[in-house]
Amino acid sequence: MHYGKIAGSALAVTYKPGVVVAPTLRTIVRRLPLGLTVLAGEDALDRPVRWVAVSELEDPTPFLEGGELVLTTGMRLDAARAQPYIRRLVARGVTGLGFGVGLGHETIPAELLEAAAGAGLPLVEVPRETPFVAVGKAVSDLLAAEQYEEISRAFATQGRLTRAALRPEGPRAVIDRLAGELGGWAALLDEAGAVRHAAGRGAAGAEAVAPEIGRLRGRTREGTPASLAFSTPGEHVVVQPLGARRIRGFFAVGLGRPFTPVEHTVVNAAGSLLTLAMEHGREHLAAERRVRSAVLRLLLAGEVEAGREALERLGDRLGDGPLVVLAAGGGREAVLEAAGEEFAVADDDRVVVVVPAGRAEETAGALQEHGPVGVGAPVGPEELRAGLDQADRALAAARRGAGPVMRFADLAGQGLLSLLDAGAAAAFSAALLAPLREYGSRADLLESLHAYLACNGHWDAAAQRLGVHRHTLRYRMRRVAELLGRDLDDPAARAELWVALNV
């Protein structure tokens, strides 16, 4: 009879695989030609056997982890030790006990059989003709088969995820496929944790992920593993960040049961595909943006034909119909990101975007989230320089607080003052009116001049507005003319003074 290498040894472990799916004791007893016979604990035969351990120790439990099929010939077992021996195995979580007969004992001791039956521990008789090593090898083959099947399924799943990533919808297709493969839900989230796309059963659970995003960011900054897993009642969730150099978003997966190691592998593969798709998309967009920026510089410089030719060689075009130039303030990267695939170029202290007139309002709405926006009037490709000048003037008005989005058409309706450069106008006003402001504390000269000009030089109307006699107003205007050295009857002088008083 062969029982493996047991004589003179305390413990010999013949197999210890690192897999989750394991064959049950029932499978081992019924399907393998080993001649095994179940003598006790038949109700517990569906427990998984995670590995086989051979031991002749009176107490092998310090060397066990639970889930083993323990094989022994009972060399050190007698009637008195049977009950404590079984009790210790049960407490350790052993799956079953295989007893080899024909060497130390011709039959299984009745005391051991009774103790196993009372504890509900499966007790299996191993005939003399069956070496313990044969049992270990048989279980090893079953475990390897289960492991191979799991790995094969994982590879097949990864292949389907990869094909999904190559579809036009890219990341969304990966999320849809992942939810279907795992039988749960999956979601794509932005950097703030807002759900952008979700699929699968119970996808509403993705909303619960947002509060965990802050914790994940904190762990990432501290340099600890940049992913997390948490459980809610009846649900297990895994969250991973997306992005190669910095976090650009997250994805989450939820199941109604714990994740197996193979499922974790599938989730990790999905994360790699999503990151690759995201980074590749960004690099492709950045390259297109650089080309479009170069073309836009040609167009703004008046090189319309050269710009059109460059676009045609790249399979792109400006589009038919009028164009609108937008000038946007705010952070360059954020504005360029918001501009998407539109023609855009970062220049000086703003980003210039050119779009077909039909998309101008939509684009302005997207850009205003990152800063003030100026919108020019519709122009042809040959007039883009003029459109840029209009957009810059509108942006200047928006920066002065006229509104988050200012349109040149509206700006022109506000009169000449709205078109002036704020800094230059303020300097002009300060210089022109300085003699009046420096004339003691006679602030009434500025007030009187404003009323006089507002009433178009009508003495009675201006004096009534100020609440003074018209002779008093005449005196003040003579003093203003003397201090400024200007003829108040000259229309040009009046225009300059009106601008200076109103900026």
Image: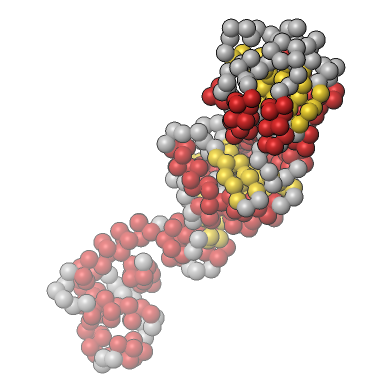
Image-based side of 180 in relation to 472, left or right: right
The picture places residue 314, in percent across and down from the top left corner, at: 70, 30
The picture places residue 236, in percent across and down from the top left corner, at: 63, 45
| Vertical side of 497 occupied by 122: above or below | above
The picture places residue 16, in percent across and down from the top left corner, at: 65, 19
Q: Nearest the camera: 343 or 320?
A: 343
Tell me what residue is drawn at x 48 percent, y 68 percent: 415
| Vertical side of 258 occupied by 99: above or below | above
Looking at this rendering, what residue extends furthest in the left direction? 440
Q: Quadrant of the C terminus?
A: bottom left
Tell me what residue is drawn at x 75 percent, y 50 percent: 201
Q: Nearest the camera: 283 or 31?
A: 31
Q: Is residue 421 visible?
A: yes
Q: Nearest the camera: 397 or 4?
A: 4
Q: Quadrant of residue 277?
A: top right
| Vertical side of 325 occupied by 280: above or below | above
Image-based side of 434 in relation to 426, left or right: left
Q: Quadrant of the N terminus?
A: top right
